[in-house]
Image (cartoon, rainbow, N blue to C red):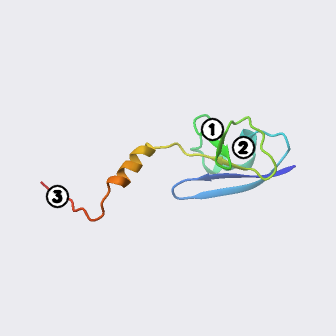
Amino acid sequence: MIKIGVAYATPADQVWYNVDVQKGVTIREAIEISGILKQFPEINLEDQKVGIFGKIAQLDTLPREGDRIEIYRPITVDPSTVKRRKKNHDPKRKLRHE
């Protein structure tokens, strides 16, 4: 047996399950064993990326002792758009109504 973590976050909630799994299980199997898919039925492993400690991994990857498996939510905004919005945002600027 090995100990791993399975983590997922929504804007309102963060969970991290510590799970004991047999050595040789895949990331997909570890996620299923954790029970996180029951708590968050919106997770779609076919569409969402997963990783270990912030590095993208395939569902058939074998986790090692102490690994933290992360399930990533889909990106809903282009990251370059967010940077541009922050750069152009001036808190002192007043909105004009024309």
Mark drawn on residue 31: none
Q: Which of marks 1 and 2 is nearer the N terminus?
A: 2
How many C-alpha atoms fall within 10 Å of the one at disc 1: few (<14), some, or many (≥20)? some
Q: Which amino acid does label 1 sit on?
A: Leu
Name the element at disc 2. helix
**Nearer the camera: disc 2 or disc 3:** 3
State the image coordinates of residue 56 (x, y, percent, origin top left): 64, 41
Q: Does the residue at mark 1 contact the one at mark 2 (Cβ under 8 Å)?
A: no
Q: Residue sitting at 30 percent across and 60 percent down? A: 90
State the image coordinates of residue 98 (x, y, percent, origin top left): 12, 54
Compared across the picture, whether 3 is left or right of 92 comes to: right
Q: Distance between the residues labelled 2 and 3?
A: 53 Å
Q: Residue furthest right?
A: 1
**Nearer the camera: disc 1 or disc 3:** 3
Q: Residue sitting at 80 percent across and 46 percent down? A: 64
How many C-alpha atoms fall within 10 Å of the one at disc 2: few (<14), some, or many (≥20)? few
**Nearer the camera: disc 1 or disc 2:** 1
Mark drawn on residue 45: 1
Q: Distance between the residues labelled 1 and 3?
A: 46 Å
